[in-house]
């Protein structure tokens, strides 16, 4: 099937690459000439594990192409996936102007009927507005547009794996023909008829993801409801962590025991610096705004957001208490990305930590396996290195801000020998406090004695 993806950001690029790997012919369009130029030269503008391999194979098999000429891409595809950004406004409401702009382009440029699919994360009732916009902007009343919602559930760092091996695929439609079209698009994924970059040879046997057909409004709500619930679990664990510090309990013992209850589960019950990235903060704000707009007060989400914003302050309290005076202290920041296995630093806790340290006169040296070039755009005047040991050389403190696997296995005996003071403030609870103390470190983390 011929598919068009509009927007070559994170979601659009992963979606286009994986749909091409599933055997479809994919036309990717974006107004960013630099990004399209990079892609046409075979360069991948974002870091995501396995994505470069998938894109190379798709290009070799001539299954994917890139253009800044959106009109041509619109006419080429039978189904159009909208993957443009929906950033938050100051009010928390999602800014849907990019989707409106794309709707106008589709309505004007299309020469034949199209199924238009929301892939961007949007609030409920957007599909209804999209349908109205397509009809309003259309110059030819003979061309009819169908609208569907197909929310993405991609985790940065494992997005390719999530696309090929999903827990579920949700399609929100208003007619059976649209449902049948989307079933056909995802049939290779559900039947595992694709070249998987994750596993050599055959993929492990097991149940494939379930395809769920819902209304458009339900599909739109599922995405926000899912992300918000996961954010709630993180903030819940962080409140438990604060309580543990007050009474001398261990948050990891508490959350591990909680997670053994299958109704609760262990995932996302992790205390630390809190959640960042572009999805959770944005989606919580949008969900709160949507709920208020229809007369539903979602106070527990407001509390989760408040708790998350307080985590950086709690972390910096530990830093100030340990260092006493922050000014002119040499501080190594381990991790810039909001989570491991990505170069995405949007709403990353490390950025606010660094900003506060600089305001207080600290000398910061930052390290990250993938996100240094993005970090330089925010803080061009601090020092960077990909080598964590170099970052800690002569440091008065090491601050762990991202849970990179490489940081879990650092040789702290080696690092300690290079540091000016053996002090670690761990924002991700990566290390065993007793072992760190045995190595001669002052060690602070969240919710543990």
Image: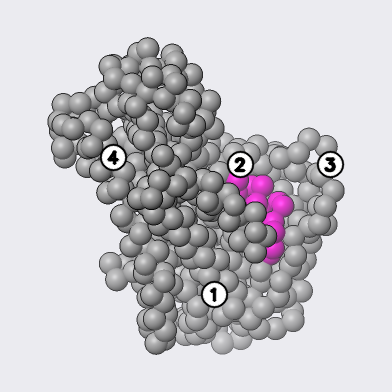
> Alpha carbon of mark 1 to alpha carbon of mark 4: how far?
38 Å
- Check disc 3 and report the residue beneath it: 202
- Check disc 2 and report the residue beneath it: 51
**Would residue 432 be counted in the magenta stretch?**
no
Q: Earlier in the sequence, mark 3 or mark 1?
A: 3
The circle drawn on residue 318 is: 4
- The reply, left or right, for residue 388 in relation to residue 313 is right
Q: What segment carries the magenta color?
A: 158-169
Disc 2 packing (10 Å; few <14; some 14–19; many ≥20)? many
> Alpha carbon of mark 2 to alpha carbon of mark 1: how far?
28 Å
Q: Foreground: 310 or 10? A: 310
Q: Earlier in the sequence, mark 2 or mark 3?
A: 2
Residue lying furthest front: 247
Does residue 1 appear anywhere in the picture? Answer: no
For the point 43% across and 42% down, the residue is: 448
For the point 53% across and 70% down, the residue is: 225
- Check disc 1 and report the residue beneath it: 221
> Alpha carbon of mark 3 to alpha carbon of mark 1: how far?
35 Å
Position of the C terminus, as image quadrant, is top left
Mark 4 secondary-structure assignment? helix
Image marks 2 and 1: residues in contact by CB distance under 8 Å? no
Mark 2 secondary-structure assignment? helix
């Amino acid at each position: 099937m011929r598919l068009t993806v509009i927007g070559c950001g994170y979601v659009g690029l992963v979606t286009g690459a994986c749909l091409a790997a599933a055997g479809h012919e994919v036309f990717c369009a974006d107004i960013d000439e630099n990004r399209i130029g990079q892609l046409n030269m075979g360069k991948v503008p974002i870091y995501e594990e396995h994505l470069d391999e998938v894109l190379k194979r798709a290009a070799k098999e001539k299954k994917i192409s890139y253009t800044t000429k959106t009109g041509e891409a619109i006419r080429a595809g039978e189904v159009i996936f909208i993957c443009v950004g929906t950033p938050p406004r100051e009010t928390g409401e999602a800014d849907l102007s990019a989707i409106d702009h794309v709707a106008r382009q589709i309505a004007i440029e299309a020469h034949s009927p199209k199924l238009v699919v929301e892939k961007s994360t949007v609030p409920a009732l957007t599909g209804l507005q999209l349908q109205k916009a397509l009809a309003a902007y259309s110059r030819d009343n003979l061309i009819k547009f169908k609208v569907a919602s197909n929310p993405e559930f991609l985790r940065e760092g494992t997005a390719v794996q999530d696309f090929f091996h999903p827990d579920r695929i949700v399609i929100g439609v208003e007619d059976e023909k649209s449902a049948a079209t989307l079933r056909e698009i995802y049939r290779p994924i559900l039947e595992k008829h694709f070249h998987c970059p994750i596993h050599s040879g055959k993929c492990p046997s097991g149940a494939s993801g379930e395809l769920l057909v819902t209304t458009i409004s339900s599909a739109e709500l599922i995405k926000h409801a899912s992300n918000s619930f996961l954010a709630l679990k993180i903030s819940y664990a962080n409140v438990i962590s604060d309580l543990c510090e007050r009474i001398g309990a261990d948050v990891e013992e508490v959350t591990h025991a909680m997670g053994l209850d299958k109704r609760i589960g262990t995932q996302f019950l992790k205390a630390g610096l809190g959640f960042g990235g572009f999805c959770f903060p944005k989606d919580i704000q949008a969900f709160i705004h949507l709920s208020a707009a229809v007369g539903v007060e979602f106070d527990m989400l407001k509390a989760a957001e408040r708790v998350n914003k307080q985590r950086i302050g709690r972390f910096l309290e530990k830093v100030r208490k340990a260092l006493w005076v922050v000014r002119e202290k040499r501080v190594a920041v381990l991790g810039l990305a909001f989570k491991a296995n990505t170069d995405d630093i949007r709403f990353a806790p490390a950025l606010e930590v660094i900003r506060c340290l600089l305001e207080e006169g600290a000398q910061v040296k930052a390290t990250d396996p993938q996100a240094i070039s993005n970090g330089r755009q925010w803080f061009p005047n601090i020092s960077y290195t990909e080598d964590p040991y170099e970052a800690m050389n002569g440091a008065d403190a090491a601050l762990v801000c991202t849970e990179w696997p490489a940081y879990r296995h650092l040789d702290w005996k080696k690092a300690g020998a290079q540091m000016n003071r053996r002090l670690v403030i761990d924002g991700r609870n990566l290390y065993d406090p007793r072992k760190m103390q045995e190595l001669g470190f002052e060690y602070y983390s969240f919710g543990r004695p």
